């Protein structure tokens, strides 16, 4: 997505001497923050007000004039290993089926803004799932570059900001211990708020969401369509870890788009929607058989976030229409599998 000139130049100054003017292209009604006098200046207190939950996030789609569409691109070989050292000429990029010139290319070892979202509903108490989720959170915090920044959120039937973006590992680890279980699951509300908050408040050009949950969404005001729309506006990769019982997984595997609960309520099949979200954003969805797999998965995600490429292009002027535009990134040699987000929503002319 479009970001300001400082963030953009920090990524491409080594490769380009030309000045590229970027402007902020997304805005959000941020989470309200309260800080007690006893807290350190960086410490972010938890916020869960009803008015906050009722607020609608406002996002501005990608601007076209003078800006690029920037993609996080992952390349793997036939053995699913990340491929390093690939050059720009290996890629072909298409928007709406029409080939585009790749204007910017960089190996991704730049800092990242990571928003970690933990399901703190009461069901996470079972089998020590919340304990393992916090361990996975700490693995992500402690296995990152020094300039990376991390934001911590928890969600039950509401979303709470535990710690805003910071690079202070000690503070982040301490704040992760504040996550306590309560209530039900409103995962769609959490995802939309996490993406908009990250898009508005992060300081790094590269961004990602990691969400850990064991629930079927029963309490969100937002729908999955709302989640996809926000994902297309922000372009943030989403990594989802779904902790479900063997019985639940068996039910999900039947392929039905809706699941009927014991209460009679119909909810989305989480395995279907979460895989769709991951594919749309070029993230990943994981469904481990045990909560003990959370830390290894967290380390896998951490490794992946450092194993890709930044690819950017100027969209054609005809894309200035406020509509969704598909993106396809291919390997010319056909030797590799390329993963990138599927598209974006552009901005209407001003």
Image: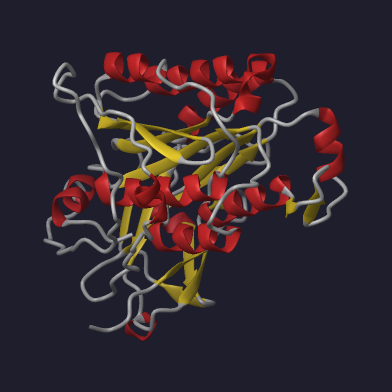
**Residue drawn 24% across the image and 46% down it:** 11
Say whether residue 101 is left or right of residue 128: left
Say whether residue 40 is left or right of residue 305: left
In this figure, which colouring scheme has been used for the structure? secondary structure
User: Count the marks: how many?
Assistant: 0
Residue 24 is situated, as x and y percent measured from the top left of the image, at 21, 61
Say whether residue 156 is left or right of residue 251: left
**Residue drawn 22% across the image and 42% down it:** 203
Query: Is 72 or 187 nearer to us in this picture?
Result: 187
Query: Is 300 or 213 nearer to us in this picture?
Result: 213
Q: Does the image show residue 329?
A: no
Q: Is residue 338 above or below residue 162?
A: below
Residue 264 is situated, as x and y percent measured from the top left of the image, at 82, 50
Q: Is residue 56 above or below residue 192?
A: below
Q: Quadrant of the N terminus?
A: bottom left
Say whether residue 290 is left or right of residue 61: right
Q: Quadrant of the C terminus?
A: bottom left
Residue 120 is situated, as x and y percent measured from the top left of the image, at 53, 28
Residue 301 is situated, as x and y percent measured from the top left of the image, at 51, 31
Q: Does the image show residue 37?
A: yes
Query: Is 86 or 345 nearer to us in this picture?
Result: 345
**Residue drawn 46% across the image and 22% down it:** 137
């Amino acid at each position: 997505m479009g970001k300001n000139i400082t963030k953009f130049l920090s990524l491409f100054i080594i490769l380009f001497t030309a000045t590229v003017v970027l402007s902020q292209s997304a805005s959000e009604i941020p989470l309200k923050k309260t800080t007690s006098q006893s807290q350190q200046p960086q410490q972010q207190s938890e916020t869960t007000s009803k008015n906050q939950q009722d607020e609608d996030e406002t996002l501005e789609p990608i601007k076209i004039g003078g800006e690029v569409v920037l993609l996080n691109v992952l390349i793997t070989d036939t053995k699913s290993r990340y491929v390093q050292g690939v050059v720009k000429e290996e890629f072909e990029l298409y928007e709406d089926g029409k080939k585009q010139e790749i204007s910017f290319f960089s190996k991704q070892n730049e800092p990242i803004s990571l928003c970690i979202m933990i399901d703190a509903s009461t069901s996470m108490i079972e089998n020590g799932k919340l304990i393992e989720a916090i361990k996975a959170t700490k693995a992500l915090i402690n296995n990152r570059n020094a300039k990376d920044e991390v934001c911590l959120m928890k969600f039950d039937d509401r979303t709470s900001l535990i710690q805003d973006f910071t690079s202070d590992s000690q503070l982040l680890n301490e704040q992760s211990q504040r996550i306590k279980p309560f209530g039900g699951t409103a995962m769609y509300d959490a995802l939309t708020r996490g993406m908009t908050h990250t898009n508005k408040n992060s300081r790094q050009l590269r961004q990602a969401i990691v969400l850990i949950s064991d629930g079927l969404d029963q309490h969100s005001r937002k729908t999955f369509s709302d989640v996809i729309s926000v994902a297309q506006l922000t372009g943030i990769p989403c990594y989802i870890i779904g902790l479900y019982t063997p019985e639940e997984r068996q039910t999900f595997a039947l392929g039905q788009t809706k699941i009927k609960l014991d209460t009679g309520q119909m909810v989305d099949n989480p395995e279907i929607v979460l895989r769709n979200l991951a594919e749309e954003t070029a993230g990943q969805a994981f469904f481990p058989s045990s909560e003990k797999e959370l830390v290894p998965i967290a380390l896998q995600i951490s490794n992946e976030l450092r194993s890709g490429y930044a690819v950017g292009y100027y969209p054609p002027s005809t894309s200035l229409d406020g509509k969704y535009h598909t993106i396809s990134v291919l390997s010319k040699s056909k030797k590799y599998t390329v993963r990138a987000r599927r598209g974006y929503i552009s901005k209407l002319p001003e």
